[in-house]
Amino acid sequence: MEEAFLKLWRKFEILGEILKKIVTSGRLMDPKYWLLKGIRRASIVCPALSKVLRTGKALIVYWSATGNTEKVALAIQRGIKRGGLEPIVKKVSEARGEELYDYHLVCFGTPVHHSLPPQPVMRFIDEKGKEYRDRGEVRLSAPKIPGRSVLVFCTYSGPHIGLNEALPAGKYVRQFFEHLGFDVKGEWYVVGEFHRWV
């Protein structure tokens, strides 16, 4: 009996510590925080809710140095419109303040520089990753959030080893979104024009 009481007491202590962190972070007064947290948890517990909670919005984020990735992003935008979603297109520099969970579909595009995304993309992923980790959105085993999907697209010229040059960049972006609980619907690797050595 005493052991059960101690376990219960410890759970209350942990809950108290969590609430203290939430209150001191200012999240307690932010209704959007609680709404998003509740929607995500409810969708995980009851996947059928994801249809009800579908936003109908899509976000296309990309970075392009030569125009190849931008061309693909705009083509995806046209396809999404035909599919009935409301697409919003933003460059990485414009998307820093975006709440990725606000979108039913996120399409994320990057060119490939030496088998990896370029520095502006890496910075975006690092900053967003830290933001979501600090908010407690990155969880062990990364449970998928129903109704939140991502498409990763990479452009490359492949003058050396072709597709194998692009795969590490696509996988890097993919794992970022998997950590956030997004369902990765696909990775597209698109051969672009070789403009110059960057």
Image: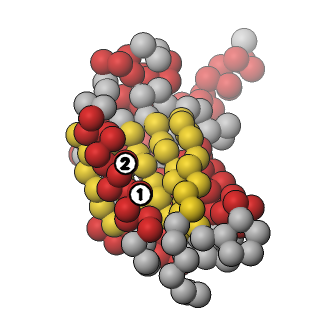
Q: Is residue 181 visible?
A: no
Q: Is residue 88 left or right of residue 181?
A: left
Taking the spot 34% from the left edge, 72% from the top edge, the residue there is 93
**Where does the image place residue 53, in percent across and percent down from the top left?**
31, 24
Amino acid of disc 2: Ile
Q: Is residue 86 left or right of residue 110?
A: left
**Where does the image place residue 125, in percent across and percent down from the top left?**
51, 63
156 or 11, nearer to the observer: 156
Q: Is residue 67 left or right of residue 16?
A: left
Which residue bears the numbered disc 2?
76
Secondary structure under the numbered disc 1 in the rendered image: helix
Q: Residues within 10 Å of mark 1 (few under 14, many from 20)?
A: some
Image mark for residue 72:
1
Tell me where residue 165 sits by quadrant. Answer: bottom right
Secondary structure under the numbered disc 2 in the rendered image: helix
Which quadrant is home to the C terminus? bottom right
Taking the spot 42% from the left edge, 42% from the top edge, the residue there is 19
Taking the spot 44% from the left edge, 68% from the top edge, the residue there is 68
74 or 4, nearer to the observer: 74
Which quadrant is home to the N terminus? top right
Q: Residues within 10 Å of mark 2 (few under 14, many from 20)?
A: some
Amino acid of disc 1: Val
12 or 133, nearer to the observer: 133
Taking the spot 42% from the left edge, 28% from the top edge, the residue there is 147
Q: Residue furthest bottom?
A: 197
Q: Are marks 1 and 2 in contact (CB under 8 Å)?
A: yes
- Establish if 183 lies above or below 49: below
